[in-house]
Amino acid sequence: MIIAVFIISLLIGVPIAIVMGLTAVVHIITTGNFTFFLNVSQRMFAGIDMFSLLCVPLFILAGELMNSGGITKRLTDFARVLIGHVRGGLAYVSILVSTFMAAIVGSATAITAIQCKTLVPEMIKDGYDEDLAVSVSTAGSIIGPIIPPSMIFVVYGVTAGVSIGGMFIAGIIPGLLLGVGFMFLAYLNIKKRNYPKNKRATLSQCINVTLKALPALMLPVIILGGMLGGVFTPTETAGAAVFVSIIVGGFIYKDLEFKKIPAMLANTAVTMASVLIIVSTANVFGWTLAVEQIPQLISKVLLSISTNKYVILLIINIFLLFVGCVMEAFAAIVMLVPVFSPLLAQLNIDPLHFGIVMSVNLIIGMITPPVGICLFVSTSMSNVSIERLSKIIVPYITVSFLILLIITYFPGVITFLPNLLMK
């Protein structure tokens, strides 16, 4: 009955927060121990009563301020001057801008929307096919939640008790690998369709655009450098990002309209509220599973199939790829981390390594048909149908899967930087 309630409510479109809360309630009813209801509100509050979560709304607000303050526009102009003159350069610019914005915005859907509003029309104007322009922009957006700061990494770190700073650093190499892989696919498409070259910018134009972009380029340095240098905690880094965004957007670029800040605060509150309700109900759901010792049971079942951790990781990868296609990443992490934690301990799998693998799995689901949220954002802002976009984005999903396998079976790709920088 519990499984049926979960699957049916999910399939008919009930919001995931309500799905997990409803499933937990049904589970309590089936146990017959109604005293558990006395603990539900406590478990919901305990799930979000964590100082580390404070950095999430601050990073969300920083992204709002940077976008409105003209910072993303300067980064786009800088990328165009840098490589926009090569054949098909705007496709590379799209991926490069996604990488730049990853260290600033950190949201795949936000990056998708920004790209569809800014670069996609420019690419079409320069003779690119709209389907290619939209597919490159959509695929590149998933770099956002992998390169720090990442809201998904924060939620995993809080849930699994893993260093959030370590998660941020560990995401850098996988994010860059995705960027290189997507650029290679863009190169193959450009070569096949013979797109034009743009005129090379003059030296004076390069200097002018670079000088204008310098304050914007300093933001990733502050965000990453502050954490790596031990100057800021992740929460303090988020606060510093908000402060610097106001200074750069409001007083250097003068594009930030201060009268719009209340609306940005409201948007931040709404976005954060949706995250917190998911985390709180997922905590109740996880608690009811723990009462029945479901995580231990799942561990026994998987270990009965194989005791080889690489085989187990393959099975978990396949499962997570499916979950990422149908479930919100925040909810999946809060719900599934307690389930897999006993297994990680038994197989001696580094929780930080597993956290990156799990996060990348779920993020790939954002561009995987039929329900990838970034696909719907792109189609709503372009003339490309969901069916067409689902077909042309398959090569990018394939490359993402290959990189997922690399980081799964070569843990050093993930752990190298944290071990080097956080001794």
Image (cartoon, rainbow, N blue to C red):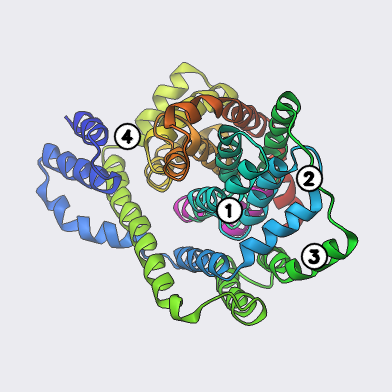
- Amino acid of disc 2: Asn
Q: Which residues are magenta?
A: 155-172
- Magenta includes 157? yes
Which residue occupies the extreme top position in the image?
305
Please give the residue where the numbered disc 3 appears in the rendered image: 210
Mark 4 vs mark 2, foreground winner is: 2
| Tag in front: 1 or 4 | 1
Q: Which mark is residue 273?
A: none
Instruction: Give the mark nearer the N terminus: 1 vs 2.
Output: 1
Question: Is disc 2 surrounded by few (<14), some (14 to 19) or many (20+) residues within 10 Å?
Answer: some
On screen, residue 332 versus residue 184, left or right, reads left
Residue drawn 70% across and 48% down?
96
Q: Nearer the viewer, mark 3 or mark 1?
A: 1
- N-terminal of the pair, mark 2 or mark 3, is 2
- Closer to the chain start, of discs 4 and 2, is 2
Q: How far is disc 1 from disc 2 in space, using C-alphas?
A: 17 Å
Single out the mark in the foreground, 4 or 3.
Answer: 3
Q: Which residue is mark 4?
A: 294
Q: CA distance from mark 3 to mark 1?
A: 19 Å
Q: Earlier in the sequence, mark 3 or mark 1?
A: 1
Q: CA distance from mark 4 to mark 2?
A: 59 Å
Residue on which the image places disc 2 = 198
